[in-house]
């Protein structure tokens, strides 16, 4: 027994403009797509339910190819600093939270971004001490490659003038050698290591909160990286399996496995794409560099606004090769965070040197800064590049200061990548950027800065079709599931995003305003805008 979906515009995305009148599904699978009359008469005896779309637009289900589900859930719960436009506004928000803190409780803020402030000076720990001297405080930067900590947090972490910078990280110090409270990349772990462990029950609740929000935005799934930060592989993987299941939550979580917990996965006799129907394991996640905003992305030439600084390599070449070789022993693909062009260059060389032979594909995450040599290299490798279109709209115009005019032609060059037949998938890196896929699609189509409303590198704009494919077929290709997800066709999964309006007939500057009517996972409506109206 199955469901007949009809009465709207149903885009299959097999080719640009392809559409059908109806889709018939049974359980979690699309049985047929075609005209309403043909499907109705062919499956008349099996149709248990009919869903009239009432003029809405059905697409294959959106999937975010790179986000952090637990961090997103925590972001919904914690103090959000991401839209604040001055250090004073941030400090006022922190002050308002101090009254309700218990003894020893950490004050945690998320998403501050000095590039939005009139004065981009980084807040010093002494300023945080004035607000909250007795409770530890940790404030994560929008990129999650830097944080601020007050003196209490630094004390709990046992950091002093003799504490060395870890590989791939920087403890920012003043002229006397004292910590300023600003920690970059791997140095953040010194502070995070002093924080109390969270319970599995807490993680489950946070995951549920995050998933409910993601479903409401039309996302049927997401590729997330959480397994090394909340008490280890077993606790976090268990929390995902308990939180997302067919009984009370349906959402397709694909979990990248940080290289530091890879052995935990192997010891459980688990590997690539193993898991449950809704929680599966993915590639081995590795960080190769930092972020552009904090000038820790690893560039081939100096930062234009910081002579002598090329960024930070999280691992030495030998260490990176060792991690990749270990993954290859188990036939595992890798997913490497690489923002600077030097970082991308290093990892492409290693991928070429230690290639997979089992058909699984590697992933390069972000890669916003390329050059002609890297384009040619990426064309030849079985990799997917996870891009975040919203990075471009939030990074400009300040990214010009970091990169200089010379590197701009191949910065955030999504169209050039597609023209070079480089497979790309679309994501948000949420909560760093808005998890709404329509925001990302609009960013890819418009390339308009949210700061000054100017369009940058207009030749790199994507068509709406190309942008939508990033979040559907692109995300499926990244995890070797392009034969079962990402388009509406016979034999594919019955995962749909149903919108109030036709995205292909919407003005580009209005795409992010389109509302989601239904989100459908495995043939089940898991989010409905107006449930009382059906």
Image: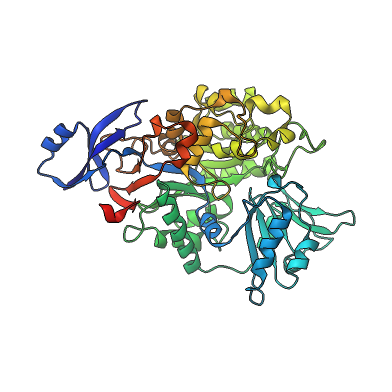
**Number of on-image labels:** 0
Give the left or right position of residue 180, taking residue 18 as reference.
right
Q: Is residue 158 visible?
A: no
Q: Quadrant of residue 180?
A: bottom right
Residue 401 vs 246, above or below: the answer is above
- The picture places residue 212, in percent across and down from the top left corner, at 42, 56
Residue at (52% x, 69% y) in the render:
199
Tell me if 135 is positioned left or right of 506 in this view: right
Q: x%, y% of residue 107?
A: 65, 66
Q: Quadrant of residue 341?
A: top right
How is the rendered protein coloured? rainbow
The image shows residue 335 at horizontal and vertical percentages of 54, 42
- The answer to whether 203 is drawn above or below residue 441 in the figure is below
> Can you say whether 329 is above or below 244 in the image?
above
Residue 185 visible at all: yes
Residue 100 as seen in the image, left or right of residue 331: right
Give the percent coordinates (x, y) of residue 484. Answer: 33, 38
Of all residues, the one furthest to the bottom in this rendering is 103
Name the residue at the right extreme.
176
């Amino acid at each position: 027994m199955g469901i007949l979906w009809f009465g709207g515009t149903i885009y299959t995305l097999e080719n640009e403009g392809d559409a059908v009148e109806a889709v018939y599904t049974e359980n979690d699978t699309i049985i047929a797509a075609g005209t309403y009359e043909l499907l109705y008469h062919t499956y008349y005896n099996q149709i248990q339910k009919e869903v009239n779309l009432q003029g809405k637009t059905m697409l294959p289900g959106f999937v975010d190819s790179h986000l952090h589900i637990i961090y997103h859930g925590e972001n919904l719960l914690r103090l959000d600093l991401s839209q604040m436009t001055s250090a004073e506004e941030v400090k006022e928000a922190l002050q308002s939270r101090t009254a309700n803190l218990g003894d020893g409780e950490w004050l945690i803020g998320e998403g501050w971004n000095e590039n939005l402030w009139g004065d981009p000076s980084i807040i010093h720990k002494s300023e945080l001490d004035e607000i909250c001297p007795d409770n530890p405080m940790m404030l994560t930067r929008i990129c999650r490659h830097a944080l601020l900590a007050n003196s209490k947090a630094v004390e709990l972490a046992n950091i002093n003038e003799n504490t060395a910078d870890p590989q791939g990280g920087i403890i920012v110090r003043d002229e006397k050698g004292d910590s300023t409270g600003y920690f970059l990349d791997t140095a953040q772990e010194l502070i995070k290591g002093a924080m109390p462990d969270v319970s599995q029950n807490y993680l489950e609740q946070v995951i549920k909160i995050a998933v409910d929000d993601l479903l409401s935005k039309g996302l049927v799934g997401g590729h997330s990286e959480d397994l090394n930060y909340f008490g280890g592989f077993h606790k976090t993987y268990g929390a995902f399996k308990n939180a997302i299941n067919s009984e009370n939550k349906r959402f397709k979580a694909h979990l990248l496995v940080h290289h530091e917990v890879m052995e935990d996965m192997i010891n459980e006799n688990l590997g690539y794409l193993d898991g449950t129907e809704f929680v599966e394991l993915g590639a081995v996640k590795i960080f190769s560099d930092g972020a552009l905003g904090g000038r820790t992305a690893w560039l081939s030439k100096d930062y234009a606004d910081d002579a002598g600084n090329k960024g930070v390599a999280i691992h030495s070449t030998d260490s990176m090769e060792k991690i990749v070789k270990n993954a290859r022993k188990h036939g595992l693909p890798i997913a490497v965070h690489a923002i600077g062009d030097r970082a991308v260059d290093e990892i492409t060389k290693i991928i070429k040197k230690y290639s997979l032979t089992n058909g699984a594909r590697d992933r390069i995450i972000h890669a916003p800064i390329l050059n002609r040599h890297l384009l040619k290299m990426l064309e030849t490798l079985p990799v997917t590049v996870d891009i975040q279109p919203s990075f471009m709209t939030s990074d400009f115009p300040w990214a010009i200061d970091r990169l200089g005019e010379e590197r701009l032609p191949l910065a955030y060059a999504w169209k050039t990548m597609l023209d070079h037949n480089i497979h790309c998938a679309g994501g948000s890196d949420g909560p760093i950027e808005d998890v709404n896929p329509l925001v990302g699609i609009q960013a890819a189509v418009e390339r308009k800065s949210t700061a000054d409303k100017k369009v940058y590198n207009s030749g790199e704009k994507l068509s709406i079709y190309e942008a939508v494919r990033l979040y559907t077929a692109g995300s499926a290709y990244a995890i070797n599931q392009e034969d079962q997800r990402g388009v509406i066709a016979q034999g594919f999964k019955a995962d749909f995003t149903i919108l109030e309006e036709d995205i292909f007939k919407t003005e580009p500057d209005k795409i992010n305003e389109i509302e989601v009517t239904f989100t459908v996972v495995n043939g089940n409506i898991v989010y409905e805008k107006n449930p009382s109206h059906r």
